[in-house]
Image: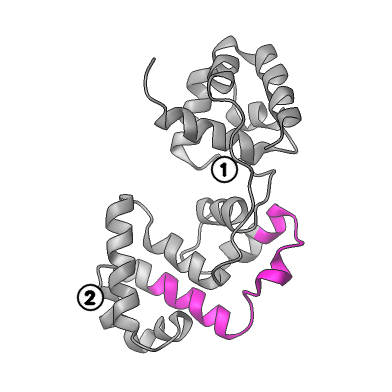
Amino acid sequence: MSEAIHARFLAIAEGLSPTLHDAMARGGPVAPLHGDIGAPLAERLCRSVAGQQLSVKAARSIWARLESARGDLPMHEFFHAVNSEAIRACGLSSAKTRAICAIAAEARAGGLEAEALRPLAHAERARHLTALWGVGQWTADMISIFYFGDEDVWPDGDVAARKTLTRLTSPRRKTVRTAARFAPYRSYLALYMWRHVDAPPL
């Protein structure tokens, strides 16, 4: 994130809430978004679904078991309905197993090519992803932010980001409206909120 964007955020925040301004100023600019070109999109989607509502430690443990269980098979080949029992044995629920198998089937059909989805606006990309069984808006938002490096996504379904913004501004103001003030860099607003949650108390 550039100093210019950080300065713009501070100016906007100052007009909204001194508390928000102070929270942003205290830690300085957040890290820039680069996206993730190191893993196939389908694998990142599957990993995101597998780790939903779990601690980081538990999610990593389950993913390690899945990687071990696949043997020499590529992930998108292992995540197949015929392997459902082996997948559930790694710690996934039936619903998550169904979801990652649906993602893998779409990948095998050629429907999850990252370069085809990268140029799309977030709303259109999200519609494509959420058409997959078990992939919700939160997952689509996280993929846009952290996989594609989209700078203008406000993940209003993320409880931590939404509640933190509410706490730093006003419970009477809708967070979507507040976030709109920070377009076209709303993803960075979410990064500020997540950082604030993890920041040590003064």
Which quadrant does the C terminus fall into?
Answer: top left
Quadrant housing residue 189: top right
Q: Secondary structure at mark 2?
A: helix
Quadrant housing residue 3: top right
Q: Write the residue at 45% across / 68% down.
A: 46
- Is 39 placed left or right of 3 in the picture? left
Quadrant housing residue 71: bottom left
Q: Write the residue at 67% across / 20% down.
A: 10
> What kind of secondary structure does the magenta stretch mostly adopt?
helix
Residue 34 visible to an observer of this rendering: yes
For label 1, count other residues whose C-alpha is less than 10 Å away and answer few (under 14), some (14-19) or many (20+): many
Q: Amino acid at mark 2?
A: Ala
Residue 164 within the segment the image draws in magenta: no
The residue wearing badge 1 is: 155
Query: Can you give x and y, in whole percent of width and height, for residue 94 in the image?
Result: 31, 71
Of label 2 and label 1, which has the lower sequence position? Answer: 2
User: Which span is picked out in magenta?
Assistant: 98-125
Cα separation, mark 2 vs mark 1, equals 32 Å
Which quadrant does the N terminus fall into?
Answer: top right
The residue wearing badge 2 is: 89
Query: Can you give x and y, in whole percent of width and height, for residue 131 in the image?
Result: 58, 66
For label 2, count other residues whose C-alpha is less than 10 Å away and answer few (under 14), some (14-19) or many (20+): few
The image shows residue 50, relative to residue 40, as above or below, that is above
